[in-house]
Image (cartoon, rainbow, N blue to C red):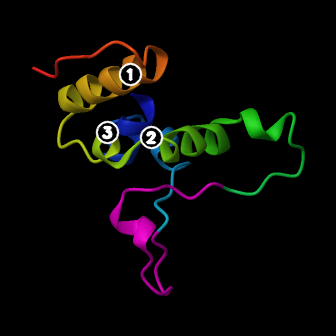
Amino acid sequence: MLMYKATHETAPSYLSQLVRVADLPGRRPIRSARANRLLVPSVKLSTFDGRAFPVAGPTIWNSQPDNVISAPSLSTFRQRLKTFLLQASFPDIIIDPR
């Protein structure tokens, strides 16, 4: 939820500044820019730096399916994320998306 708020600029400004969309000005447009994918900065120390918000947040965000991260509202995002996580945890159970 924090990453959704950061990408839609409803999170505190100090968090929103740490998140960058993969579409960078001056570069050729890439497919990931249309899909709300985030830029994951490179890290020097994989054990410590990889846990920082600017790295871990976009990594987890980019691992979500497109229908989850392209939700038009926070409530829709929450519902789709919950459904995705339940289906990933319990693949044998059929979830009715009402």
- The reply to whether the magenta stretch includes residue 38 is yes
Q: Nearer the viewer, residue 27 or 87?
A: 87
- The residue lying at 52 percent from left, 43 percent from top is 63
Question: On the picture, is 33 further left or further right than 44?
Answer: left
Question: Which amino acid type is shown beneath numbered disc 1?
Answer: Gln
Q: CA distance from mark 1 to mark 2?
A: 13 Å
Question: On the picture, is 67 further left or further right than 53?
Answer: left
Residue 34 x, y percent position in the rendering: 33, 66
Residue 37 x, y percent position in the rendering: 45, 56
Q: Residue furthest front?
A: 92
Q: Give the magenta-colored segment's residue range.
A: 23-40
Residue 94 x, y percent position in the rendering: 27, 16
Question: Which amino acid type is shown beneath numbered disc 2?
Answer: Gln
- The reply to whether the magenta stretch includes residue 49 is no
Task: Residue 64: give its label.
Answer: 2
Q: Nearer the viewer, residue 37 or 10?
A: 37
Q: Quadrant of the C terminus?
A: top left
Residue ID for mark 1? 87
- The residue lying at 50 percent from left, 85 percent from top is 27
69 versus 85 height, above or below: below
Q: Are marks 3 and 1 in contact (CB under 8 Å)?
A: no
Q: Are marks 2 and 3 in contact (CB under 8 Å)?
A: yes
Residue ID for mark 3? 68
In front: label 3 or label 1: 1
Mark 3 Cα shell of 10 Å, populated few (<14), some (14-19), many (≥20): some
